[in-house]
Amino acid sequence: MPNYYLIIQTRLGQRLGMFRVVCLLAVFDAVCLLDTGMLFPRESSSREVKELNGLWDFRADQSPNRNQGFDRAWYKSRLAETGPVIDMPVPASYNDITQDPALRDFIGWVWYEREVVVPARWVADGGTRVVLRVGSAHYYSVVWVNGVKVTEHDGGHLPFEVEIGSLIRKDPTVPCRITIAVNNTLTLETLPPGTIQHMDDRTKYPEGFFVQNFNFDFFNYAGIHRPVLLYTTPKAYVDDITVIKDVFLCVSGLVKYNVSVQGAANATLSVTLIDKDGRCVATSNGPAGVLKVVDVKLWWPYLMHENPGYLYSMEVRQHADGKSTFEDVYSLPVGIRTVSVTSTQFLINNKPFYFHGVNKHEDSDIRGKGLDWPLIVKDFNLMKWLGANSFRTSHYPYAEEILQMCDRHGIVVIDECPGVGIKDIRSFGKASLTHHLVVMDELVRRDKNHPSVVMWSVANEPAAEMPPAEFYFKTLIQHTKALDPTRPVTYITASNYARDKGAPYVDVICVNSYFSWYHDPGHLEVIPIQLNTQFENWYGKYQKPIIQSEYGADAVPGLHSDPPVMFTEEYQKVVLQSYHNVFDQKRKQYVIGELIWNFADFMTVQGILRVVGNKKGVFTRQRQPKAAAFILRERYWRLANETGRLPPWTKYPCSL
Ligand code: BDP
């Protein structure tokens, strides 16, 4: 496949900058392990989409070694013929759907199956590619179509797809049977890592007893979490688009693009940029080019501008050649903005941006981590109500549908890969690093064009003081910068500033701390001094801007106490307020953001530290506010009024 990479041309002909980018792209060419695109499936005049969401047949492999499905080839016939099946909604985690604790805590292979009626025209037209796409399935997936294995995928939070046209054309009279086996077993080399521990002491545990251990604090929900669909393209098609945005003098925008085509050696391409009113504002031809937009409408974050989240539409048209190549049309939303970092600031469109936002989880009652539109829209409404301008996708990539919402609403995103819980020294080995690099390739490939994504996070709270961490993070961060020279890269640390081995390589220091909670529990008075010391130490050593990427306290809704005690709503409030006082001093210097842990309560494994999940949400799991939500709301709107450029009607709650 041809790879076209753009040289960033800077206004002043900055040869140095140009050289840097060329080198980085050369590195990318050498290291990127993926050779196809992963454009979000969209309908167009040349493409159709058929969603396969709804009820699938489902069967968990309860055999002692969890391998009966493979041993007996469950994919060869209808799943219902292999044994009892139940209804399972897709997308959804399977864990909370039934009353069966064995399924909630199941570890191993589960099997999904569904028959699809494929439109006759797709089958009849041999010139149509039919692609089966899974938005995400946790963790490891194997896929068959009519009993033939078509693909497998390692990793629970990113999409994968495969062309199945020839298989469905083999016998057009039989319905297309799709079987997906999904395994949630984690190993030292998966992301996140985990281990299986067998308990063989028969005086304590029943036959075959085992548990899965891991070092992350959320329930390991599993199943098909995001939409499954079929979509079509012509045989020769637009496979990938990369856009790099630049702005000159705040007046002209430059969109440098490159398009890769599969299936045609010499495709003729035209590219048109269309504004929100449907006006064509720039055009270009060929697989790589620059679209110059006069009087550009920039993409601005929510609360930073009266018209946030402005998106153009970039229409890429691959022309028919009158013989074998047919027209293909793909429209990509494009927001024009720049991102840069100084030693004390984070700049969007050259203006200082202060992150006042949240950390989230994909998590809710019944659905677990399954994509759910009512929940997504509710969460956006709550974020806007709070006055939050940003969030971090703790601790894994979220559905691309969520990033599309962020693009449209101007919510800024720190996009995190599933590198959470890397605590065992064996997870710093070659196999782990190789997999981690592939996951970053997949993440950047999927999310590179989203204007809302302003920074990559390669991990959360790894054991960054271990000796192999230096090579590991240096490699990972440099690789990510090579993949995308336009965005800063970080990882989230909870290590000691003096011993953290990866910090020299990050662009922004993101630090998590829980003073008066995990340290000095119950002693709210330590927060000002310890938080101040934390910031001074990190900035003193690295002179890089700092985000407080997590802070907070559990509050069981409805528990009250004055003076505050831990787990009450009052305690959570005072923790937040004590942190805020220090942020207000430091944000005048080098602190560039604060992200509360957490937006909402979420499910975790059972344990003595968790009361039906983690209760550090400012909203409950059902999205009702705790007292802390009102504290945050008042603060975030005040910050917005101070740092943004808002029209008067948005100034709430200044009068409070
Ligand atoms: C942080 C982790 C986060 C946890 C949080 C907590 O990054 O995943 O949920 O602690 O303990 O260290 O609440």
Image (tube, rainbow, N blue to C red):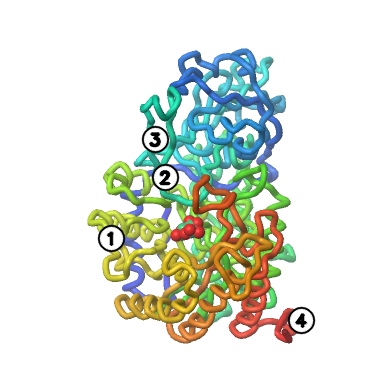
x then y, percent, for residue 572: 58, 69
- In percent of the image, x 31 and y 49: which residue is there? 30
With respect to residue 592, does 605 lie above or below?
A: above
Q: Amino acid at mark 3?
A: Ile
> Which residue is drawn at the image coordinates 40% and 51% (left, top)?
421
- Look at the numbered discs 3 and 2 and tell me whether their residues touch, using CB distance below 8 Å: no
Q: Gap in Å between the C-alphas at discs 3 and 2? A: 9 Å
Kindly report the distance in space between the C-alpha atoms of the residues bearing marks 1 and 3: 25 Å
For label 1, the residue is 465
**Percent x, y for residue 278?**
73, 62
Look at the image and tell me in which quarter the N terminus lies.
Answer: top left
Residue 45 versus residue 618 in the image, above or below: above
First-in-chain label (1 vs 3): 3
Q: Nearer the viewer, residue 370 or 77?
A: 370
Q: Is mark 2 within 8 Å of ligand 1?
A: no
Answer yes or no: do the residues labelled 4 and 2 have beta carbons within 8 Å? no
Pointers 4 and 1 in contact (CB under 8 A)? no
Residue beneath disc 4: 649
Q: Earlier in the sequence, mark 4 or mark 2?
A: 2
Residue 214, disc: 2
- Mark 4 or mark 3, earlier in chain: 3
Residue highlighted by disc 3: 196
Q: Is mark 1 within 8 Å of ligand 1?
A: no
Residue 225 figure quarter: top right
- Locate residue 236, reporting x and y percent: 55, 38
- First of labels 3, 2 by sequence position: 3
Front residue (pair 6, 385): 385
Tell me the kind of residue under disc 1.
Answer: Glu
Circle 4 or circle 3, nearest the eye? 3
Q: Secondary structure at mark 4?
A: helix
